[in-house]
Image (tube, rainbow, N blue to C red):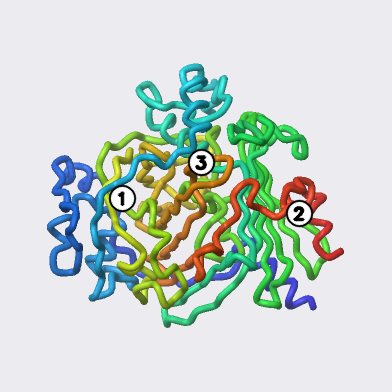
């Protein structure tokens, strides 16, 4: 029992050692990429990007994607890769979110405090800064990303395929399943919900995840609570329930670099927008506006996203059956901690390619403390009509590549049949509306009852 306890705690808190391999990509290459892509060559609709022609269109690819095509790391693009290009869509935001942005966006402000922290003022709902400009343009884009377009309630369960697969350098696959409940608790604009929930006062979002398989990790759970007043609470509170101990542990602020459940996402990565930190002690440098190729809305008529059958292995790249890739206008920012909070932090730069409609980052390149490229994380969006909400995000698939250590983690809330997708808002079973159970530390103590 003691050995199991130590193993579970190590996996959750990120204490397991890893072998660091040679690194070949310095942060300065990103600055050169910005210069080289000032004039971009866009693939026409109907083009299929392959290993034979990818260099012609590399100016619309994130730097991490280019590295996969170049094959300079253990993870490299499959020889048979095909990326069919289609037209982009720009009707992906719920009407209520757009209305909130139009009504309240002009009142939102930013204040830089004497200690260097940033404070958002007068934010109510929707996108905080619909047209971010200087001063503090990079931070405003980061704030838009932090409060990106999302539903009030997102639920993924074992029954509708909340699945994660860890893949090592030898191709060994370790599957896991989860219950995941992400809830907005304030700044809500979705119809049928209050503007602010009462079960977790002072927060604006709660993130709950409980592991259901494999059996030896069953009931291990994590809860993060994000606060409205980020000057008072500059970091989210994170609690982990360890079944072998039959109690929860509150993690320190240094745990933001720890891998969630031992996967390739750190706590600061574990959200579908590409950033899960705060806007008080992080800032961002605006680098450029570009068009970037991505799969923002993969097709619900495809054969699905079963792993590994529907992925081009070994790097879990979407097969053409997923749908079309398209060019999206993005703002590229370099996110990092403010100087007074930077010591000991794992990432020197978080390069985010932030979609200018949805404000989520479809791709993120992460640099370690020595300014070497460490990870690349891709988020694939799916949108559909949600009853009572309109057109909205219905989930995300993601792959996190550890380029230095050659392992990766695949998340997908989808599988055949396609009816089995995440629950959005009132699609969710009634039990998941229990905010105390799925959004407070007291709820963690109910797990083994």
Comparing labels 1 and 2, the label whose residue is closer to the camera: 2
**Residue 168 percent across, percent down from the top left:** 46, 76
Most foreground residue, 370 or 142: 142
Is residue 337 something one can see in this rendering?
Answer: yes
Image label count: 3
Quadrant hosting residue 291: top left
Residue 64, above or below 351: below
Label ID, residue 291: none
Left or right: residue 7 versus residue 80 is right
**Residue 220 percent across, percent down from the top left:** 71, 65
Q: Which residue is mark 2?
A: 431
Label ID, residue 27: 1
- Residue at mark 3 to residue at mark 2: CA–CA distance: 23 Å
Left or right: residue 302 versus residue 264 is left
Comparing labels 3 and 1, the label whose residue is closer to the camera: 3
Residue at image coords 55%, 40%: 389
Q: Which residue is mark 3?
A: 390
- Going from the N terminus, do you reach mark 1 or mark 2 first? 1
In what element is the residue under mark 1? loop
């Amino acid at each position: 029992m003691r050995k199991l306890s130590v193993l579970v705690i190590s996996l959750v808190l990120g204490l397991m050692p890893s072998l660091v391999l040679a690194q070949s990509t310095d942060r300065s290459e990103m600055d050169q990429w910005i210069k080289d892509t000032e004039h971009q060559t866009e693939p026409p609709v109907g083009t299929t990007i392959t290993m034979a022609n990818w260099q012609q269109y590399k100016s619309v690819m994130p730097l991490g994607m280019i590295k996969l095509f170049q094959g300079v790391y253990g993870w490299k693009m499959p020889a048979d890769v095909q990326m069919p290009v289609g037209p982009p869509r720009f009707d992906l935001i719920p009407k209520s979110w757009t209305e909130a942005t139009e009504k309240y966006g002009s009142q939102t402000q930013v204040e830089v405090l004497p200690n260097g922290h940033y404070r958002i003022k007068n934010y109510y709902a929707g996108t905080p800064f619909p047209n971010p400009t200087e001063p503090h343009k990079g931070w405003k884009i980061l704030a838009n990303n932090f409060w990106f377009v999302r539903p009030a309630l997102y639920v993924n369960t074992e029954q509708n395929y909340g699945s994660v697969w860890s893949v090592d350098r030898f191709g060994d696959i370790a599957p896991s399943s989860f219950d995941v409940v992400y809830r907005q608790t304030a700044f809500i604009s979705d119809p049928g919900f209050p503007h602010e929930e009462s079960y977790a006062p002072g927060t604006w979002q709660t993130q709950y995840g409980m592991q259901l398989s494999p059996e030896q990790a069953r009931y291990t759970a994590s809860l993060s609570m994000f606060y409205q007043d980020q000057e008072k609470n500059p970091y989210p509170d994170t609690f982990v329930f360890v079944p072998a101990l039959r109690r929860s542990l509150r993690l320190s602020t240094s745990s933001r670099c720890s891998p969630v459940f031992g996967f390739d996402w750190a706590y600061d990565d574990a959200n579908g927008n590409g950033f899960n930190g705060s806007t008080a002690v992080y800032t961002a440098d605006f680098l450029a506006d570009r068009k970037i190729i991505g799969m923002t809305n993969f097709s619900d008529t495809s054969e699905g996203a079963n792993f590994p059958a529907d992925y081009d292995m070994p790097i879990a790249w979407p097969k053409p059956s997923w749908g079309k890739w398209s060019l999206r206008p993005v703002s590229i920012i370099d996110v990092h901690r403010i100087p007074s909070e930077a010591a000991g932090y794992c990432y020197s730069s978080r390069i985010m390619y932030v979609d200018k409609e949805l404000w989520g980052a479809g791709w993120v390149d992460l640099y370690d403390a020595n300014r070497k490229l460490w990870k690349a994380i891709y988020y694939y969006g799916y949108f559909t009509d949600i009853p009572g909400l309109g057109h909205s995000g219905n989930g995300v698939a993601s792959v996190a590549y550890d380029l230095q250590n050659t392992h990766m983690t695949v998340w997908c809330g989808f599988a055949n049949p396609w009816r089995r997708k995440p629950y959005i808002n009132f699609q969710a079973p009634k039990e998941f509306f229990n905010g105390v159970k799925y959004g407070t530390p007291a709820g963690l103590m109910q797990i083994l009852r």
